[in-house]
Structure formats: structure tokens, C-alpha cells
Image (cartoon, rainbow, N blue to C red):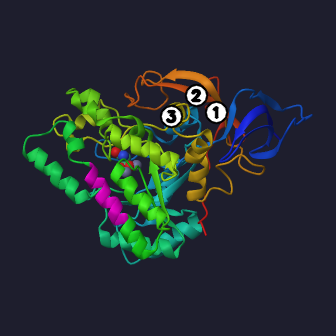
Amino acid sequence: MSEILIKNGNIVTSNNVYKSDILIKDSKIELIDINIKTNSPNVKIIDAQSMYVLPGAIDPHVHMELPTPAGNSSDDFRTGSIAALAGGTTSIIDFVTPSKGQSFIEALNLRKKEAEKSLIDYGFHMSPTWWGKNSANEMKKCVIEEGITSFKTYLAYKKVVGISDEILINVMKTAKDLNALVTLHCENGDIVDFLKNKFISEGKTQTKYHVLSRPPEVESEAVNRATTFAKLVGCPIYIVHVSTKQSIDIIKKAQESGQKVYAETCPHYLLLDKNIFNKNDFSQTAPYVLSPALRTKEHRNKLWNALSNNIINTVASDHCPFNVIGQKDVGINDFTKIPNGAGGVEHRLSLLYTYGVSANLITINQFVDLIATNPAKIFGLSHRKGKIAKGMDADIVIWNPDKEEIISAKTHKQNCDSNIFENYKVKGMPEIVIANGKIALENDTVNVNDLKGNYLFRKVQK
Ligand code: URP
Ligand code: ZN
Ligand code: ZN
């Protein structure tokens, strides 16, 4: 039996910060108490004096080895999970994206195989990209037999994975009957396609037209539609990567009316500005081609405010990196061909801590809610993860509030030749990460030999 004893740390929960020791036995938290003693000869003792002790973070939105015409996103489950651990994330929820006509369960089994190389625990959202007579039954199998309690729908990317309103309503109705959650990428795909085609036909091919083809209204129209449908169908929803102030107003109104509408944003929408596209250099702008597009300060202020007022419930990374050389550069003469997305799984916590907690925009308790406790609750993992308590999985981050780093693609663990937060300074980083009761990160090194992630069977919210 392996034991780890964490001494003198400041444990952070949703509503408290308190000093206590934690004893871990094998993969579970065995005891939380002051001044724990053990006489086990094999115990590893960690002195966490002046450190925060956080629950292992859960990133509910990542795309490891996502297939695209420009190749897979550049982190696979192994490299992506190493980067995740380096930043304090011990569980991820990725996606199963069946091709049109493919059985959801068949696609899930193939995806499970790809994810076996993950060093951290992983689950999946299922994406109904099409609808047939067996689809409702397949959704039921996902929930009951596979522990998949959330269904991701795309209102954008119409020619690839995007669905019609009719299919969305079918998915919502089925999810409601199963007590499951529908998550949505909210952008109006038809109007995006119209704007993209218009720019290309006018010879406007540079990266800045990516942003101009996805103005804020493209998102807020879809958020409005999603919340309206959800209300009429009676289905709880979760809106991924919210980026605009208009969306926040719609979400707030729906929440205030009693609707179950959860919202997520990402560090890039909280920190980066669309004026990055004023540079005319492809390699400096292509990394920022992601969807929804980057916005302005006005939107960012509203997002921070929505975090502090608990309107936004989670901060996810939407980790989806592509190299500039060999991947993003397929679109050097046509922005519509650039694979959308950027890496972020490694620095989600340190960015949110530095620019949120230390800047007094959110509290340390809200920080823990946003990165761990709320994702666990919303996505059916709170019986095992998302908080530090006796009997929970021993996924723990010893957080050093004084540790500093300047983010750079030269030093990051993400497998990508750029980093959208290049030169961002962070203060507050993991010192030690424990995953499933094992030391996963120590001395800035991920202990790759000792770790193996497990498939996460999730539970529906009643
Ligand atoms: O640009 C992005 N966000 N790429 C990843 C896929 C998605 O839309 O979330
Ligand atoms: Zn998306
Ligand atoms: Zn995504």
C-alpha cells in the first residue's frame, strides 16, 4: 500500500480555506485532520506550509488528436495529458465525434482506444452529428451503459459536424428524458459561411477576415436560439466557450428565470484581444485563429464580471493546438482553410490564478469552483472528484502562490510550435501534482512512467 501525507497545507474548498493535513492511501483520500501521524515505513511526506492545497483540476473541454483536413490537433492523449499535469489538471473531458451515419457507440469504442495512452483520467462528451431512427436509443446507451451524461452539439461548422435546428431539438428532447445535459458550440454556422464566402470572393483571404466573419452577433444569435429551444423543450444546457457580452446578458436572463443554463469561458477570451490581427504577419496571427473569435476589452470585462457573479460556471481550455508550420499554414492564402484552435490545457490554472485571483477579480474559492468543483458537479463526477474530502479520488494540486513563469512555446510541454500566451507572466503554479494517489508532477517533471489514466464513467444529475 502506498501512502502520502501532506502536512500543514491550506486546503481550498468552494467556501473555505483551512489548515489541515491530508493522508492518502493508494488512490483515495483516507483522512483529513490536524496533525496526522503515521508509522507506515513507506509514507512520502510533503510539507505544504505556505502552499494552497487544491482539488485536481478538471478540464471539461479539450480536443486531443482531433482529426481535421490539416491533420490531427498536435497534442495526442499522451502529450496532452503530460501538459495538463504540468498545469495542475488531473482529469479531462474530450469528445466523441461520429462521422455522419456512424454509430455513436462504434465511434466511442474507437475513441476510447485512442485515449488509452492518457496519463490522466478521461471522459467524453458524445456529439450527435447526425440523426437516424436509432439515435435516441444510442444516446440512452451512452448514458446508461457508458456513463456519458453530456451531448455536445455544434451550431457552427455546418458542412462538417454542425447540425440543423430540427436535430438539435431531437437531441434536447432525448437528453431531457435521460436527465442528461446538452452542451453547445453557439455560432450561427450559416451566417459564418455566408460571410466567409463573401470575403473570399472579394479576395479578402488574410487571417484578420477570420475575426470579421465571426462577429459577436454570430454567437449571441445562437445563444439566444439555444436558450429559447432549451426552455421550450425543458432541457438543461451548457454553453461552451462564451466570448461576448451579449451572450452573458442572454444567459443571465435565462438563469434568473429559473432555467438550467450553465456557461463556460476560456482563458483566451478573458485575456486576449482581437487587435492581435492588426499585425499582417501570417505566422504571428495564425495561432489566434480559433472560434468563436477573439473580442475586445468591453467583452472581456463583462466575462470577468460574469465569473465573479457566478453567471459563468467553468473556465475550460478548449485545448486544440495546431502547429503553424505544417498545419495552420495550409491556410496561408485562404483563412478559411486554417484549422481552428489553440493550446491551453497547460496554463489554464496559472493564468486564471494570476489574472483573476491575484488581481482580485475572483476569489480563491471561486477559482476552485471554476476549475474543479463546478465541472465535477455539472458533468457527473462529484461523487469522486472536484473537491478535497475523505473518500474522494486522490487528485490533489499543491499550489505555490509564489512560483513564477514566463509562458513560452520554447519551454511549454504542449506539443505545438506556438503558444497564444507567449511572454505572459504568471505567478502561482503547481509545485506538486498528485493523480490517482501517485506523484505525477514534482520538480517541474511529469513522472510519466508511473501514471495511467482511467476512463471516467459519469453519473446523471437528478
Ligand atoms: O477554434 C476552436 N475552438 N477549435 C476547437 C473546436 C471548437 O470549436 O471548440
Ligand atoms: Zn467549439
Ligand atoms: Zn472545443
Looking at the image, which residue sits at the far right? 39
Residue 351, position as x, y percentages in the image = 49, 33
**Which of the two discs, 1 and 3, labels the residue nearer the N terminus?**
3
Mark 3 CB within 8 Å of ligand 3: no
| Magenta region, residue range | 216-226
Q: Which residue is mark 1?
A: 449
Residue 151 percent location from the top left of the image: 46, 63
Q: Position of residue 55 (x, y in %)?
A: 66, 43
| Real-space Cα separation, disc 1 to disc 2, in angstroms | 26 Å
The residue where tag 3 is placed is 346
Q: CA distance from mark 3 to mark 2?
A: 13 Å
Q: Residue at x 41, y 69 (%)?
A: 230
Work out whether mark 1 precedes mark 2 in sequence or the reverse, and give the earlier one.
Answer: 2
164 relative to 357 in the view: left or right: left
Give the residue displayed 73% in from the left and 50% down from the top: 392
Task: Kindly indicate the quadrant of the structure image that contains residue 183.
Answer: bottom left
